[in-house]
Image (tube, grey):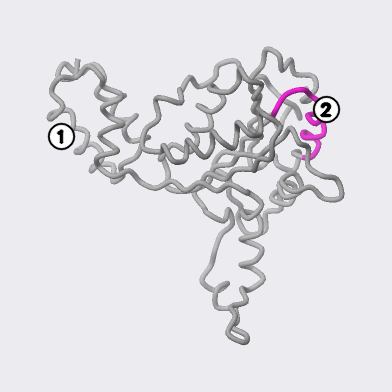
Amino acid sequence: MSGSEVDWQTTPAAVWRRHRSGLRAIRRLDPVQWESLTGIERQQQALARNTERFLAGQPSNNVLLWGSRGTGKSSLIKALLNRYMGQGLRMIEVDKDDLVNLPELVDDLCELPFRFVIFCDDLSFDVGESGYKALKSVLEGSLELPPENVRVYATSNRRHLMPEFMSDNLKSEVRDGELHPAEAIEEQVSLADRFGLQLSFYPFSQDVFLQAVDLLFPKVDDREILHLEAVRFATAKGVRNGRTAQQFYRQFAGDPRFC
């Protein structure tokens, strides 16, 4: 099933399936809501503004959300679809290994009366992988300009999407007082540079982490005990983020102390 064969009037999202070389409509969307996210208000505002400009046919950027694991990058994209699907936003999830099919997929979308976000989750490339070349052509085009109704939103733990080695930095040179990065560094940075909007995500402070926990347990009276258990849980995991707050909720929801 190509992009033009999906009933986009009733289908807000689809995923590319390699084995069938086509799209499968997503019937059970993650229900995460925009208002349920906490600790990432700055990123929400920037992403909302860019998306609203895209939906209005105004200049807008491809977006890279990068940073620490579990800090809400993927959840923010899912909440974005739930917030804007009624305004014509449609989303297609494409795995990194399937990016070679991206130019053909985009060809099927350019004449449709919807605005499409191509969603690439947990995007990064290892040495020798060539899938990023297809992504480059969609981000900035080649001889043909990229379609106006398609943008790429990607999440990654890597700022530059490519592996960075100390040996690459050693090959850089200083000439006439100017730093000239090595070719390997230029290649690493060039892909991420094609994302005009880059949003960074960092581990939560303890206060922000406890705010996320409070949102998940709105009816608890004894906040002191709740926070004590939440901090213990996060300390055992070694990280404070939105994912840890969700995992704490799944483990302690229904606990008599928090009902």
The spot of residue 129 in percent (x, y) is: 67, 54
Find the magenta span and give its range.
103-115
Q: Earlier in the sequence, mark 2 or mark 1?
A: 2
Assess whether mark 1 and mark 2 are in contact (beta carbons under 8 angstroms): no
**Mark 2 crowd level (few <14, some 14–19, many ≥20, 10 Å Cα):** few
Callout 2 amino acid: Glu
- 3D distance between C-alphas at marks 2 and 1: 55 Å
Q: In terms of image quadrants, where is residue 211?
A: top left
Q: Is residue 108 magenta?
A: yes
Q: Is residue 3 magenta?
A: no
Disc 2 or disc 1, which is closer to the eye? Answer: 2
- Quadrant containing the C terminus is top left
Question: Residue beneath label 2, please?
Answer: 111
The image's mark for residue 228 is: 1
Q: In terms of image quadrants, where is residue 36?
A: top left
The image's mark for residue 255 is: none
Q: Residue at x 45, y 22 (%)?
A: 33
SS at mark 2 in the image = loop
